[in-house]
Amino acid sequence: MEKVLVIDFGGQYNLLIARKVRSEHVCAEIKPYDKISCEEILSEGYKGIIFTGGPNSVYDEESPHIDKKVLELGIPVLGICYGHQLMAYTLGGEVGDAGNGSEYGKIEVSHKGNVLFDEIPEESICWMSHTDQVIGIPEGFEVTASTKNCKIAATANDEKKLYSVQFHPEVTHTQFGQQVLRNFLFKVCGLSGDWKMESFIESSVERIKRELGDREVLLALSGGVDSSVAALLLHKAVGERLHCVFVDHGLMRKNEADMVEKIFTERLGKSFVRANAAELFLEKLSGVEDPETKRKIIGKEFIEVFEKEAEKLGEVTVLAQGTIYPDIVESGKNGSAVIKSHHNVGGLPSNLKFEILEEPLKFLFKDEVREVGLKLGLPEELVYRQPFPGPGLAVRILGPITKEKIEILQEADAIFREEMKNFGGDKLSNQYFAVLTDVRSVGVMGDARTYGRTVVLRAVTTDDFMTADWTRLPFEVLEKASNRITNEVRGITRVVYDITSKPPATVEWL
Ligand code: XMP
């Protein structure tokens, strides 16, 4: 399978580079600069290499560098931003502050005709974000593009197939950025662009078979998209040597635990185990009001239940996880700066000792994971499931959690989601749900006074869940949901809509 290696130097657009390459049907794998050797590059058979941007100056003491031999393997290389400067510096060119100041934002660039700029007008707009620049090119190179303040905005050594650009071709602000990438992939590297999700599935299955042999594999299946897709992919590779443990903590949405069980017993047979722990979780959470304590209890119990199930299986040496690429980036594990610490329930089991951690989706983005899921036969309701927090409804019930409160919230939430669906909810909002408060208020039903709980409806619009806006839902949805909830859910006398964005609020209430 043809693939390209993206060497990560810690830049903020790195994930975009891989994504843009894959959109050309070329497989892209991302590796941190300090975790890759020439031997590995050769043995993996990469057909092209891309150096990403990064926040450093090549002269910083701590700045990431690369073995010069990587540039002498005969494999085409494209350096972007920091990668452009690093390539020049490594091969004997000069990097510095040209005295023209930094460039940031949309800048006019003109090229001088080179394969990298094929089919691109001589003058166009590119996206720049740099302080240092290349001020002297290495021997054998020529300058192929420049801007007003950056005379060496692109370089090329056609004979050695080494190319570099100071601007970012991967961002949409660079008018012909995708064409630059296409030129590199197809005209320089000579790739055919025949990579498809089916090829990803096939090659992953082959790789997993080869690497895991006849080992037993354990996976915590939450019913979320990532762990579900990982489960199906692994099952295709190792069959019943896969053991998926689904811990039912009793805090799922209405009927969801049964849905997960149905879907996976049909597809995984004996590889699926449901651990019914609802009673245990309720007991441990009894009387607990503090949100962080709730989360901690759930995390701890989750691991205990999971470990108990795992112990029943005998010797299992591989732990599999549905980690996807943004998880790695957000946790700062890939060399990039930490954006958000990843909060999944449980984390890694502490007592079990595994020899191998298998993360078959770690190079994929969410939309790609969904595509794999559909190809593997997962139903759409699961593949397009909105995000659901690991601790489940516990972070949506204020005050102590009781069985009755869980049931009330499940009913109200199901009604809201049903009404949202009727109005094309997924197109209106990225995440929507109900929250049960402890606030009681007076109402009137028939001729009688009531004194019931308040339910909050929350719907947010967001790209990345790190910031979010409250969704301007049509009044009709709110009206219908409110009517139905107060009529159909016993104990609810008031429904309110949350109109707070994140920040200052968070998406969840707890
Ligand atoms: P917040 O409340 O932090 O939520 O603004 C942002 C997104 O993360 C989800 N969320 C969680 N997901 N475990 C998870 O797996 C958690 O503990 C957790 N807390 C919040 C939340 O649903 C939203 O999509």
Image (cartoon, helix red, strand yellow):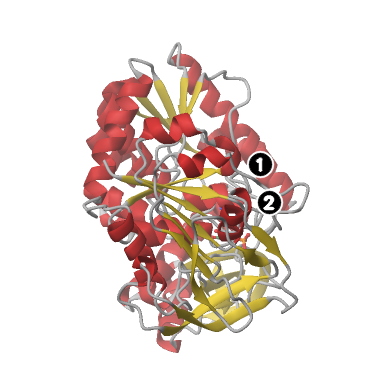
Say which residue appears at 62% left-offset and 56% top-offset: 93
Q: What residue is pinned by disc 2?
A: 400
Q: Secondary structure at mark 1?
A: helix
Q: Is residue 77 visible?
A: yes
Q: Residues within 10 Å of mark 2 (few under 14, many from 20)?
A: some
Say which of 336 and 50 sits in front: 50
Compute the Cα span from label 2 to label 1: 8 Å
Q: Residues within 10 Å of mark 1 (few under 14, many from 20)?
A: some
Q: Is residue 375 left or right of residue 225?
A: left
Say which residue appears at 41% left-offset and 78% top-offset: 428
The amino acid pointed to by label 1 is Leu
Percent position of residue 504, x then y: 71, 73
Q: What residue is pinned by disc 1?
A: 285
- Marks 2 and 1 close (CB-CB < 8 Å): yes
**Residue 79, disc:** none
Q: Is residue 503 left or right of residue 313?
A: right
Task: Specify the quarter for ligand 1.
Answer: bottom right
